[in-house]
Image (cartoon, rainbow, N blue to C red):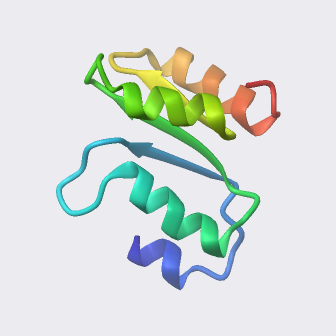
Amino acid sequence: MTVAEKSERTIDLLLSDVIMPHVNGLQLAENLRSRHPGMKILFMSGYTDNRLIRVNALLTDMDYIPKPFSSLELVDRIRRVLDGRI
């Protein structure tokens, strides 16, 4: 998060794992979105029963991709999120 806080550039997309050591993905997204309101969000997780993320992804402009995924699947999903096709 420090790099994003110091950046003067606009952040178009946050790709974040849901579960991380010091902050979860939702907290990170909320923090960054307060500074970058147009930022799109794509969460990933290896936990197949992460209902919270899937519900939030359906209720907002966040999206979710379950692990494991291929690099082609990830690139396709990122393109769709950035293009607003999700």
Residue 59, picture quadrant: top right
Please determine whether, in this image, residue 17 is positioned above or below residue 28.
above
Q: Which residue corresponds to the image point at 48% horizontal and 23% vertical from the top-left?
A: 65
Classify residue 83 as left or right of residue 15. Answer: right
- Tell me where residue 1 appears, x and y as whole percent: 40, 70
Q: Quadrant of the C terminus?
A: top right
Q: Which residue corresponds to the image point at 39% horizontal and 50% vertical from the top-left?
A: 25
Labels in figure, total: 0
Q: Which residue corresponds to the image point at 26% horizontal and 23% vertical from the top-left?
A: 47
- Tell me where residue 55 appears, x and y as whole percent: 51, 29
Q: Which residue corresponds to the image point at 71% horizontal and 69% vertical from the top-left?
A: 10
Residue 49, picture quadrant: top left
Furthest residue in direction left, as rendered: 21
Please determine whether, in this image, residue 11 is positioned above or below residue 2.
above
Classify residue 38 as left or right of residue 33. Answer: right
In-front residue for pair 36/60: 60
- Tell me where residue 50 appears, x and y as whole percent: 33, 26
- Tell me where residue 39 appears, x and y as whole percent: 69, 56
